[in-house]
Image (cartoon, rainbow, N blue to C red):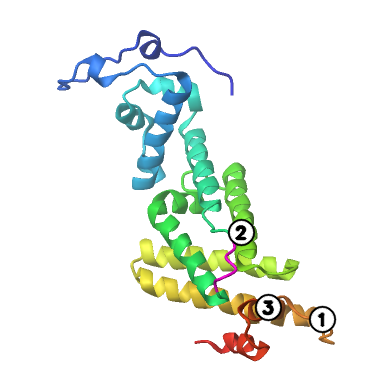
């Protein structure tokens, strides 16, 4: 994107007072270094896109909240679409690193529950922005936005594999976890948009579904690729490793599949 010259309001260090605004231009505007001004605008945009649907957010409103002229937003970010993409990029980068480091002291069900809780915390904080990104609201099938969402899903799967300590994860297990991410999106939509489920119900749904997927469903799918059953499948390897770590006999690990 080719940058234009900075608007006069930025160069002069003042913005034109709005009718009825009793604050002085000096109180409304503070000269900041370029990077700080850019971050300030981005912070305001992130908050507004989180509070309102994409179509209801105007760059003029963002500029007013940030105390700058609208031209400065276009100078730093281009169009509203480009500013929104920057907000989504920051959201996905932040959410992708929320997974905790592997904890050898935690059992598999405890680890799964922790992962789901962290996901729900992130979803609740950024619901409007995230659903706008998923729906490509106001974009059509925007390839850059879809790329950001898909890359986030891939990162999330890799974080889940690391936190769950799955030894030698297969392509089948990765595919199952990507399917699970779609379930997680649908469940949080029922909670945060449709209001048909509350958080506790969504937590139960996602926790039990994830545990079942990694210990039962993924191994069943992998068994179809190896009818002879001559290898330890992904879910069996995960449970076996958990049992050895916790000092439990393998029979107890096998019981995890039968948990309600």
Secondary structure beneath dot 2 equals helix
Q: Is residue 193 visible from the viewing direction of this image?
A: no
Cα–Cα gap, marks 3 and 2: 17 Å
Q: What residue do we see at 46% from left, 13% from top?
A: 6
Q: Nearer the viewer, residue 178 or 4?
A: 178
Disc 1 designates what residue? Answer: 231
Cα–Cα gap, marks 2 and 1: 25 Å
Start-end of magenta stretch: 102-106
Say if mark 3 contacts mark 1, CB within 8 Å: no
Disc 2 designates what residue? Answer: 159
Q: Position of residue 234 (x, y in %)?
A: 72, 75
Q: Position of residue 260 (x, y in %)?
A: 49, 87
How many residues crowd around disc 1 within 10 Å: few (fewer than 14), some, or many (20 or more)?
Answer: few
Residue 175 image-quadrant placement? bottom right
Is residue 94 depicted above or below 239 in this figure? Answer: above
Disc 3 designates what residue? Answer: 235
104 magenta-colored: yes
């Amino acid at each position: 994107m080719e940058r234009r010259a900075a608007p006069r309001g930025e160069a002069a260090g003042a913005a034109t007072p709005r009718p009825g605004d009793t604050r002085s231009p000096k109180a409304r505007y503070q000269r900041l270094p370029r990077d700080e001004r850019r971050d300030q605008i981005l912070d305001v945009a992130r908050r507004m896109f989180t509070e309102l649907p994409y179509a209801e957010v105007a760059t003029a409103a963002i500029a007013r909240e940030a105390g700058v002229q609208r031209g400065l937003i276009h100078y730093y970010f281009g169009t509203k679409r480009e500013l929104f993409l920057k907000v989504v990029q920051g959201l996905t980068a932040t959410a992708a690193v929320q997974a905790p480091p592997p904890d050898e002291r935690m059992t598999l069900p405890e680890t799964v529950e922790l992962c789901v809780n962290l996901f729900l915390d992130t979803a609740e904080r950024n619901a409007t922005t995230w659903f706008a990104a998923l729906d490509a609201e106001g974009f059509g099938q925007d390839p850059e936005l879809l790329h950001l969402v898909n890359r986030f899903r891939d990162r999330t799967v890799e974080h889940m594999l690391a936190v769950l300590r799955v030894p030698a994860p297969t392509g089948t297990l990765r595919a199952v976890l990507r399917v699970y991410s779609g379930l997680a999106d649908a469940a949080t939509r029922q909670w945060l948009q449709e209001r048909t489920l509350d958080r506790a119900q969504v937590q139960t749904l996602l926790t039990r579904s994830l545990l079942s997927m990694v210990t039962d469903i993924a191994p069943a799918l992998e068994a179809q690729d190896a009818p002879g059953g001559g290898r330890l499948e992904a879910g069996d390897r995960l449970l076996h490793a958990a049992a050895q770590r916790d000092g439990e006999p393998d029979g107890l690990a096998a019981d995890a599949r039968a948990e309600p």
